[in-house]
Each structure stands twice: as structure tokens, then as C-alpha cells.
Amino acid sequence: MPTAIQPVIAAEGGALRFGDYTVKEKQKKDGFEFGGETYSVKTHDLVTRLERGGILAVETVPGTAVSGYRADADSVVFEAEGTGDTQITLGLAQSATYELFSDGESMGMTKTNRSGKAIFSVDLSEGSKKIEARLI
């Protein structure tokens, strides 16, 4: 069972923790500062979405609990906990190639579209997984 964040935010060692897939009603927090950036989060059982500066950073369908979220110019890494097959959309660099990892194992390469989105799925039915996207 995840630790409810209501709906966000905990800053842990330079990383974010947010989301609660156990709640049915939408929760949100807008305009919070972290690391010099402004973030917003929306979460419930059907979707968890983090925006940085009004632009998608990460979205999961169905909702998840995300911990250890860190992003820089070359990578995004976080741990996701959820309830089964989960679609993840990452906001990354436009028209770039990334290698995707789940618990340290490569899931292959993906190329982002012109809006910088990469979309893939992971199975979270057996517990949380560490997700990483690295610029190639």
C-alpha cells in the first residue's frame, strides 16, 4: 500500500515524491516550487500527472505513486508503484532517441515525437519498478 502524499509533495534528497493511486477523487496541487522550477500535480486512481512550467513531465494511466523523481537534460529516473499494466508518458527532448529501462533492464530504444513525448507501458502488478529514460 503506498504512502499517501495528499497529493504531493515531498522533496527527498533532491527528488520528488507525488501521486496516490488509491484515491477515487481527483487531488491536485498547483504552482509549487522545487529546484527553481514551478510544478503542478494531479492524481487519483485513473491518472497521475506532473507538469513542470506548464509542460508535461510525466503522466501515468492508471494513476501511480511516484518516488525518487529526478530529471535533467539527459535523463529521467523515478520509481513507480501501481496496480497493473501502466502506460507512462514522459515529456523529454523533441525528436531525440532514448533508451528505456525498467528495474535496470533495457526495454529498448524509443524516439520522441516533435512534442518530445515518449509513451510506453510497464507492468506494476508485482510491485514498484524503477523507470529510467537515458538520452542516446
Image (spheres, rainbow, N blue to C red):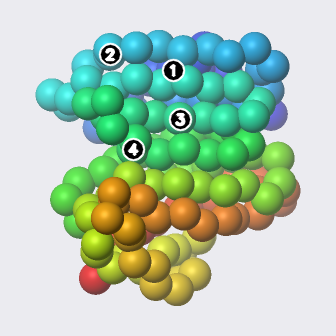
Residue 77 visible within the image: no
Q: Position of residue 101 (x, y in %)?
A: 52, 74
Q: Residue furthest left?
A: 36
Query: Within 10 angstroms of label 2, few (less than 14), some, or many (20 or more) residues?
Result: some
Q: What element does badge 4 sit on?
A: strand
User: Which is nearer the N-term, disc 1 or disc 4?
Assistant: 1
Q: Quadrant of the N terminus?
A: top right
| Tag 2 residue | 32
Q: Residue at x 29, y 72 (%)?
A: 95
Q: Which mark is drawn over residue 62?
A: none
* Amino acid type, callout 2: Phe
Q: Is residue 123 above or below residue 50?
A: below
Q: Position of residue 112 (x, y in %)?
A: 38, 70
User: Which is nearer the N-term, disc 1 or disc 3?
Assistant: 1
User: Which is nearer the N-term, disc 2 or disc 3?
Assistant: 2
> Considering depth in this image, is 60 or 12 the residue closer to the camera?
60
Q: CA distance from mark 1 to mark 3?
A: 11 Å
User: Which is nearer the N-term, disc 1 or disc 2?
Assistant: 1
* Amino acid type, callout 4: Ala
Disc 2 and disc 4 in contact, CB within 8 angstroms: no
Q: What element does badge 1 sit on?
A: strand
Q: CA distance from mark 1 to mark 4?
A: 15 Å
Q: CA distance from mark 2 to mark 3?
A: 14 Å
| Tag 3 residue | 49
Pair 2/4: label in front: 4
Q: Position of residue 46 (x, y in %)?
A: 75, 34
User: Which is nearer the N-term, disc 2 or disc 4?
Assistant: 2
| Tag 1 residue | 8
Disc 1 and disc 2 in contact, CB within 8 angstroms: yes
